[in-house]
Amino acid sequence: MQFRLEKRREPSKVMLYATPVAAVLLTMIVGAIIFSAIGYDGVGAVREIFLTPLTNSFKWQDLGVKAAPLIIIGVGLSIAYRANVWNIGAEGQYIMGGLAATWVALSTHGMGGWWTLPLMMLAGVLGGAAYAAIPALLRTRLNVNEILTSLMLTYASVQLIYYLVRAPWKDPMGMGFPQTKRFAAEALLPNIFPGTIVHAGVPIAIIVALVAWFIMSRSVFGYQMRVVGAAPHAARYGGFSENKTIWLALLVSGGLAGMAGMLEVAGPFQRMVPGFPTNYGFTAIIVAFLGRLNPLGVIFAGIVMAITFVGGEVAQTTIGLSSSATGVFQAMMLFFLLAGDILVRYRLKRVAPQEARA
Amino acid sequence: MTSELIIAIIVTVVGASTPILIAALGELVVEKSGVLNLGVEGMMLVGAITAFVVLFTTGNHYLAILCAAGAGVATSLIFGFLTLSLSANQTATGLALTIFGTGFSALAGQGYSARPVTLMGPLFPADLAAHPIWRVLFGYSALVYFSFAMVIGVWWFLKKTRAGLILRAVGENDLSAHSIGYSVVGVRYAAVAFGGAMAGIAGACFPLLLTPQWAERMTAGRGWIAVALVVFASWRPFRLLAGAYLFGLVMTMELYAKASGGPLSVIPAELWAAMPYLATVVVLVLISLRRDASSNAPACLGRPFLPTN
Amino acid sequence: MTLTRRSMLKAGVAAAALPLLGSKAFAQSEPLKVGFVLIGTVNDNGWNFGHSEGAKYMKAELGDLVAEPTIVENVPEGPDCERVLRELAQSGHKLIFATSFGYGDYVIKVAQQFPDVKFEHATGYQRSDNVATYNARFYEGRAVCGTVAGHMSKTGKAGYIGSFPIPEVVMGINAFVLAARKINPEFTITPVYISTWNDPAKEADAARAMIDQGIDIVAQHTDGPAALQVVEERGAVGGFGQGADMSAFAPNAQLTSIIDHWGPTYVESAQAVIDGTWASADRWPGLKEGEVQIGPYGPTVPEDVAAAAEAVKNGQIDGSLHIFTGPINDHTGVERVAAGVTLTDAELLSMDWYVEGVIPPA
């Protein structure tokens, strides 16, 4: 019995939803076997990493807080990637959003009011969008590959944080440590549920995803993004400007990354520190793909990634699984997910032996 | 500056430049075939731990390099299988490969951190290698000469051989290469494996050439610098050589300037550290301003090969 | 040795519990769960390794009184650490050590939610009812190293590889050069900050840059043996192990080492929690308490130099010597500490100026 891959006329809806679930299940099974084989408690590792964060209700707030920035950035990236615009510098745009919001918080320190947070939000979105405008300008004017420019700019922005918190923005009362002062109360995100750590960024993430889903599936803008991405030539005939799409894709994804940066610095961080870049921008690339470039799928994907992060820490505290093992689990899951992609576009067809050779 | 100091600086620059040069040469070939593998950092870490463990166990530097190359190939084939056989997205797969390499190397390296090994000695006899002046040419280990040889080798392969022509054709226009009858996937597999071998050897440079120990994440982001370098060099091997040494010089001069306490150390450390990346953006702009050069970028870079059969 | 000490300790605790039998004895059947939060991995040969050794020591000393310590590695300084701290508190850990400065805000925050859990924050300054801070007087060890350097350096120039110019590092540099200048008044030290805690290849290159420019003593504040290995390879005068004895990596170049020995502090805290006597405080032990130790002297260190170093060590142990006693000038030559005056702990912990002999970085 032999199999052959055959391209589907339309991507399979069933596989679209089934493959991510299958990938997670496969990771759990294969992971348990491999880790048991090399002398770890494989079953325990799988239980702690994948199940405990879901079964322990104490962990839900952690999942929400960890997933929120991944979802917001992932939604922006999924829009850009739909349009075939490969912004992989979301980490840098997230950083610039956080820095812009920090600048507002520091310069209004002690004289803020109800308007501080909206202003920080505006600054964050603009900061992220402005940083994404550089690759957009270079791509549309000079045809410079945005994958490379956005990536390079990310590494430059990390150094900008180090410089700012070490020198001009350093907290004078911080014992010389490189960090800004703690934001004033008006510049901190309120908690949604008292007694938890769930801040306003969590519902905002869900709203962003829902709005994006609505726009992408129901509006001319969404249609333009999808058409330019899927069939650039047809789009040109249809009167959609490719350059305009590139600009929109980068500004939207950069702006959302900047928004996530603002929410993180005003929520969990409460001040700018050198540890602010936490790879959310890179992880969100994986989240966008895991969510099949669909804003609703990104919600699911963001939560799955959050589970592995939170679960990885649980596994360290409960069964002493080292943090590197969690990394291997995460990578394995991503490999299975990416491998499963093919089943969406192709089907496995059983063929007679002689036909297979042809 | 005395001549001894200049020679000493050159020797340090050579050390700092060699791993990024080797890794970038591999990535250059990969990208010329139309594939963007962002997993260089992960493959380097797998190479580094493999080289360390082999060296610690056998004491043989050459065997360590060979095994590091093999481990790099094995790691790169995960990427190859996903992106070439299953046409998964290259950006996401490359990032996943780096997560894998970081985690795997740390897991494999547990218990090897407090173990010393020895650096690889110079290739030439001590009369030349330790000579106060001639050491600038002859004072290096085989890895350094290997990196130079590979610059010429990669240039010769891409420009002068039929296989190199096919590889470039596959990267330039995969559909026409396919219609002429070349195996696009086969060529790209070979390129990805070569990139893996080179990244593995680049990783081996860390315990063998720079600091004889194993430390988790010891490549510290140099795989990303290698990715930047390929673009910086606009996919040309000799520019890559110049670029690697320029990056190495920037990284090294920061430290020499600071250690001298002299006037250069007025430049904030962060600007030094950001320079390779900013320079790459500037070079990208400059390339695109020149009409002829932009064509050197492989047209199919990062796109999956999807023949409509 | 450990075995006998452990059994003696256990016997002692059992005897103390005798009069109270009942509930107290019952409570002891449930061992205390202690958690450790680390910024890196236990395999770093330095800071994090030291803390994990301390955790092992605590377990060995207290035996069945404590559960197998829980160590969480690679926890970034940010919201992720808040989650880990809460995870530890929720899973029944009653004593939690947070071992990096950047955890401070989150320790305070989580401690409010778990008033019955005791937290201890290394290198921090924020305390509350159930948050204590602790650190080690590493500068005392630096003064011993500086003494060795002052005697042995031929060029009178040392380099110091640090990550970031935080007070801890500045204090160490100052102590080192103050001690060295008591031997050689012309002695200078050049700090090189490399903006990372873990890039061994960069540390090695920094050491090469120093040695190539006439520096013959390389001290470091970063983890790992990279710089020492370069000193060994180049045959410069020497360097110092940081956090642990690194003579395996540099048998000739390591002149001596500063060894972090957190174990006794951890035993003391765990015992206090078990006894119900734990109280929030700021602890800053050093050579005297054995939390900072000086490793063996290297083969190239002459006996008189070792003796001079031991004298500095013993002077700090018996209190006759405090390296930060005036007169001390800053690097521009202006007197900052008058003769006979000693800097207070608070002044040390916020030190942001260099003493005379430091060539200040930009």
Image (spheres, coloured by chain):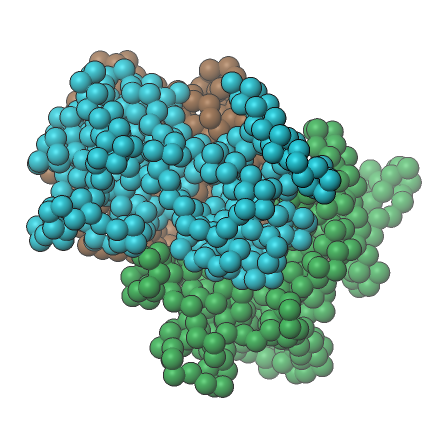
- The residue lying at 44 percent from left, 51 percent from top is C281
Q: Nearer the viewer, residue A225 or A334?
A: A334
- The residue lying at 45 percent from left, 57 percent from top is C127
- The residue lying at 54 percent from left, 33 percent from top is C58
Q: Is residue A199 above or below residue B203?
A: below
The answer to whether one can see residue C26 in this image is yes
Q: Is residue B165 above or below residue A289?
A: above
The answer to whether one can see residue A90 in this image is no
Count of marks, rendered view: 0
Q: Quadrant of residue C157?
A: top left
On the rendered structure, is A352 left or right of A163?
right
Q: Is residue A212 above or below residue C146?
A: below
Q: Nearer the viewer, residue B24 or B256?
A: B256
- The residue lying at 69 percent from left, 58 percent from top is A59
Q: Position of residue A67 (x, y in %)?
A: 64, 62
Q: Position of residue C137 (x, y in %)?
A: 33, 40
Chain identifier of the green chain: A
On the rendered structure, is A280 left or right of C310?
right
Chain C tint as drawn: cyan
Q: Nearer the viewer, residue A42 or B43?
A: A42
On the rendered structure, is A333 left or right of C34?
right
Chain identifier of the brown chain: B
Q: Nearer the viewer, residue B85 or A116?
A: A116
Q: Position of residue A170 (x, y in %)?
A: 33, 63
Q: Quadrant of residue A144?
A: bottom left
Q: Quadrant of residue A86?
A: bottom right
Q: Position of residue C243 (x, y in %)?
A: 39, 33
The residue sitting at the front extreme is: C19
